[in-house]
């Protein structure tokens, strides 16, 4: 059976099950990449989309995933239909286009701070689903690197990645005196780079502080809706940005390890031991170019080497 016909059969099955469960459902609509229907119960609207593409058929829900109705639909479908990227809609609004941002490296003693921004419209969101984009925490490093390479190849004008190497990071931290201020600067820079080529009315960031982005007060952004969410990766544009950021982080760690430096992610006792060993073997100059100096770990290491 052709993949598009399979998707149509599947959404008809979905429609039957939802009506049986007393949901009011709209007529099935055919879009460029999917079939969809909107299911309503108790004033809660959940959009069910069945995508067809090279990788087969995918079923996606859009709606407030904290609602009883969303969870009921998920339970109904999970029995025999594979679910994919769940788009949480706490604001009860779906965005056809926006710029999403995310960062990685904030809690790692070794390595850079990386911030990425990605513009998406409806077509790009559909294509990202085809690439299996989801919350990067659900993906292995191998999978992240593979997806990131495809994103960069397919959408070269729609993203920006800011990599702040440890040497530059330490200088900027001296200037800002606060990690969140530094993050604000980096997120603003990434958004600005993408916005120049892809102006949009909505920007969604993973919430790293209560303060608005610095550029929110600039004239060209005065009509832009800035949204901060504690789990921004539930939006596929933010998830794509997260994947791009983690890919660059992976590249940095791989490159350093290939040069013979035993750098590790995180800030555990193992990380402290690895950093101390690098300090003793390669000296303070090299050490300073590999770590974020404001971490308390630095004081432990300096105390150890001074004994």
Image (cartoon, rainbow, N blue to C red):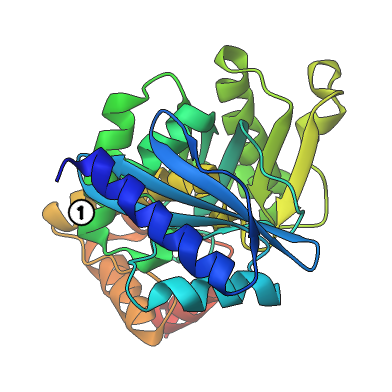
- Disc 1 on helix, strand or loop? helix
For residue 236, say whether it is visible: yes
* Nearer the observer, 78 or 66: 78
Image height of 175 relative to 16, above or below: above
Which image quarter: residue 40?
Answer: bottom right
* Nearer the observer, 97 or 230: 97
* Nearer the observer, 269 or 7: 7
Which residue is rendered at x = 61% and y = 43% of the image?
172
Image height of 11 relative to 76, above or below: above
> Which residue matches tag 1?
254
For the C terminus, the quadrant is bottom left
For residue 295, say whether it is visible: no
Q: In this view, does 238 lie to the left or right of 212?
A: left
Q: In this view, does 223 lie to the left or right of 79?
A: right
Residue 197 pos. (x, y %)? 56, 13
Residue 12 pos. (x, y %)? 41, 54
Residue 96 pos. (x, y %)? 62, 33
Q: In this view, does 25 lie to the left or right of 146?
A: right
Q: Is residue 47 left or right of residue 165?
A: right
Which residue is rendered at x = 80% and y = 62% of the image?
43
Label 1 packing within 10 angstroms: few (<14), some (14-19), many (20+): some
């Amino acid at each position: 059976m052709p993949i598009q016909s399979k998707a149509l059969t599947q959404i008809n099955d979905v429609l039957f099950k939802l009506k049986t469960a007393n949901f009011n459902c709209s007529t099935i609509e055919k879009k460029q990449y999917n079939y969809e229907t909107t299911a309503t119960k108790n004033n809660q609207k959940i959009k069910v989309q069945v995508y067809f593409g090279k990788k087969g058929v995918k079923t996606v829900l859009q709606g407030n995933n904290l609602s009883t109705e969303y969870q009921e639909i998920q339970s109904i479908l999970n029995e025999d239909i594979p679910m994919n990227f769940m788009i949480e809609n706490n604001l009860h609004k779906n965005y056809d286009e926006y710029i999403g941002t995310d960062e990685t490296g904030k809690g790692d003693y070794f390595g850079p701070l990386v911030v990425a921004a990605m513009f998406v419209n409806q077509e790009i969101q559909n294509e990202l689903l085809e690439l299996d984009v989801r919350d990067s925490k659900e993906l292995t490093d191998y999978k992240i690197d593979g997806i990131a390479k495809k994103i960069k190849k397919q959408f070269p004008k729609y993203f920006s990645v800011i990599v702040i190497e440890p040497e530059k990071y330490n200088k900027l931290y001296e200037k800002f005196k606060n990690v969140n201020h530094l993050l604000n600067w980096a997120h603003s820079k990434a958004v600005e780079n993408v916005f120049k080529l892809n102006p949009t009315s909505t920007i969604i960031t993973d919430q790293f502080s209560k303060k608005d982005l610095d550029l929110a007060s600039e004239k060209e952004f005065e009509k832009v809706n800035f949204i901060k969410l504690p789990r921004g990766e539930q939006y596929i544009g933010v998830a794509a940005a997260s994947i791009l950021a983690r890919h660059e982080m992976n590249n940095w760690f791989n490159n350093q390890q290939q040069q013979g430096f035993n750098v590790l992610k995180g800030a555990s006792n193992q990380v402290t031991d690895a950093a101390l060993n690098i300090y003793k073997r390669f000296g303070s100059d090299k050490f300073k170019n590999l770590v974020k100096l404001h971490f308390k770990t630095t004081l432990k290491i300096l105390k150890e080497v001074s004994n």
